[in-house]
Image: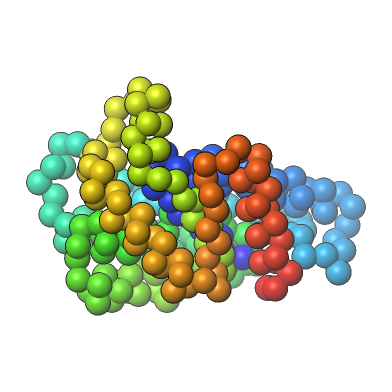
Amino acid sequence: MFITFEGLDFSGKTTQAALLVEKLRFMDLRGARRGADPHSHQPAGSGTVHFLREPGGTHISERIREILLDKTSHALTATAEILLFSASRTQLVSEVILPALGRGEIVVCDRFVDSTTAYQGYGRGLDPEDVERINNVATLGLTPNLTIFIDIPVLEIEQRKLAAGLTFDRMEDSGREFYERVRAGFLEIAQRQHARFVVVNGMRPLEAVHLEIWHAVERAFANA
């Protein structure tokens, strides 16, 4: 099972992905203690849930991440940006994700290919056909079983940034109009790919968001 989380920066997706991984691992260990139930859709056995992030997840991918998020990389062109994200991704897919899925393990990834379509396609304005071709090469044709998009208004991003008092990286410093295009892109992708996408309102309390995500994951296991 391959589950991805998408959303704008400060949407809470990383927190929600971590909560899901924690619950999956708890269910996994509980199943291992009790013995596998052949009628259960819950994962069984220990050590089978991987939590990854993009860009990153391998030594090479983490090195690329440093370049992409470094504010001194201000001269990076949109084309160079998408190629770097894609280089990081294909390394992660080849080195970690495909081998794990081949062993029947669960992979939860904080961002994947939909982020490239939304950020570099809709946000940066790169040609959609070029973006799709690059994505297909980088993913080796891999598509998530389930994608959770945590949706929040762009104004909320700005308020959360101010409240956090954090220094923004190169991507986070792209401006309101850019993020409006990215959000619209995510929502359009979700509409086109509705069979695997679940759009979750990220403005609700943390536990309510987590519960909706967990129900979506249970449905995905039931239909797998």
Percent position of residue 135, x then y: 33, 70
- Could you tell me which quadrant the C terminus lies in? bottom right
Percent position of residue 115, x then y: 37, 58
Q: Along the horizontal axis of the image, is 42 left or right of 207? A: right
- Could you tell me which quadrant the N terminus lies in? bottom right
Identity of the residue drawn at 61% across and 45% down:
209
Q: Residue furthest right?
A: 34
Count of marks placed on residues: 0
For residue 152, above or below residue 132: above
For residue 209, above or below residue 131: above
Identity of the residue drawn at 71% across and 61% down:
218
Identity of the residue drawn at 73% across and 69% down:
222
Q: Nearer the viewer, residue 86 or 7?
A: 7
Residue 110 appears in the figure: no
Percent position of residue 38, x then y: 86, 69
Q: Along the horizontal axis of the image, is 109 left or right of 64? A: right
Percent position of residue 201, x then y: 53, 49
Q: State which quadrant residue 198 falls in.
A: bottom right
Residue 32 appears in the figure: yes
Q: Nearer the viewer, residue 209 or 168?
A: 209
Q: State which quadrant residue 72 falls in.
A: top left
Q: Along the horizontal axis of the image, is 198 left or right of 81? A: right
For residue 102, above or below residue 181: below
